[in-house]
Image: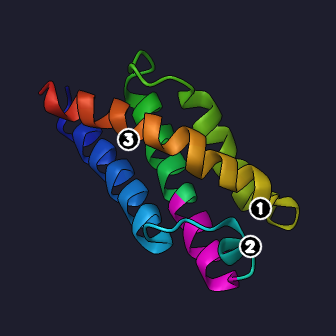
Amino acid sequence: MKREIKKYLFDIKTSINSIFDYLGNERNFFEYQNNKLLRRGIEREIEIIGEAMNRILKMDSSIEIKNARQIVDTRNWVIHGYDKVDDVVIWGIITNHLPKLKTEVETLLDSE
């Protein structure tokens, strides 16, 4: 695996960890929804994840990350559709998709 790809994978892992750190152990949707600073911070981390994934796909489109294209699409939606970002959708990404992505990224990093 190219060194640049490993760097981007590490960036994804770091952003996922940051999101979970921001939320703490309690992970309360209503706290998230009512805290603009928290929402914006998490949206920024999702942008970073999507941009890193986009750069990885440009270097190696066969990377073994499920939903890689959807991750990039989510980044584009958060950036370009900022006025249509849905807290419920973002919360679903946080709770359902990020743990799986983190596992995939760690597996790729550990295999090198």
The residue that disc 1 covers is 87
Please tell me which of labels 3 and 1 falls first in the chain: 1
In which quadrant of the rendered image does the C terminus lie? top left
Q: Amino acid at mark 2?
A: Gln
Residues drawn in magenta: 35-45
Amino acid type, label 3? Lys
Q: Position of residue 24 (x, y in %)?
A: 44, 71
Q: Give yes or no for contact between labels 3 and 1 (Cβ–Cβ under 8 Å).
A: no
| Residue visible at 66% across and 73% down in the picture | 32
Quadrant housing the N terminus: top left
Q: State yes or no: discs 2 and 3 in contact (Cβ < 8 Å).
A: no
Q: Mark 1–mark 2 contact, CB under 8 Å?
A: yes
Considering every residue shown, the one lying at the far left of the view is: 112
Residue 20 position in % (x across, y down): 44, 62
Q: Secondary structure at mark 3?
A: helix
Give residue 84's quadrant in the image: bottom right
